[in-house]
Amino acid sequence: MAPIECIPIGIVRSPYRVRGDAPRQGRLADTVAEIHILDAYAPGLEDVERSSHLIVLYWLDRAERGLLYAKPPGETRARGVFSTRSPARPNPIGFGIVDLIRRDGTGLVVRGLDALDGTPVLDIKPYSPEIDCIP
């Protein structure tokens, strides 16, 4: 199968410098971060303020890629990586649902993002409780 090319649309600015600084789950933290969208993709931000929450997909560029097993916190044995939320995985794509605090030009100020400072952003989508929440 041919490799897939992803081009970042922006970059995360957060207080987290190394993995140990970041919470295990961003939604459990009250930390504010910024997502800076590259100028070429800025027109895609039009009407983003219509959503109170966003889905952010980002590339975990400092994660290990060769692991197929990971031991979740509090568990005694490793499991297949696809049954965990470990950042170490063959394609380290991060997924977060964040509160949109405000848009500042090409920047988005958000709450609840656990990405490290400098993390490449792959995509942003509106969060829809009717579609994205499974009761």
Image (cartoon, grey):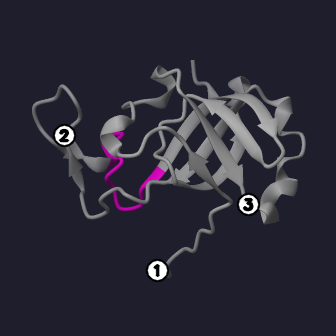
Q: Image check: 20 left or right of 110? A: left
The residue nearer to you, when weighing 135 against 54, is 54
CB within 8 Å, label 2 to label 1:
no
Image position, residue 62 (x, y; %) = 37, 58
Give the labeled residue for mark 3. Answer: 38
- The image's mark for residue 103 is none
Q: CA distance from mark 2 to mark 1?
A: 29 Å
Residue drawn at the location 53% of the way across and 40% of the way down: 14
- What is the x, y in percent for residue 13? 57, 45
Q: Look at the picture and state if 32 lies above or below 55.
A: above
Q: Say which amino acid is labelled 2.
A: Lys
Q: Is residue 70 left or right of residue 42?
A: left
Magenta range is 82-93
Which of discs 2 and 3 lies nearer the camera? The answer is 3
Q: Is residue 84 magenta?
A: yes
Q: Nearer the viewer, mark 2 or mark 1?
A: 2
Q: Residue at x 58, y 24 (%)?
A: 134
Which residue has dot 2 on it? 71
Q: Amino acid at mark 1?
A: Met
| Residue drawn where x is 44% and y is 54% of the image | 60
Residue 8 percent location from the top left of the image: 62, 63
Of pointers 1 and 3, the one earlier in the residue sequence: 1
Query: Where residue 78 appears, x then y in whole percent?
Result: 15, 42
How far apart marks 2 and 3 lie (CA) works out to: 36 Å
Residue 1 - label: 1
Cα–Cα span, label 1 and label 3: 30 Å
Identity of the amino acid at label 3? Leu
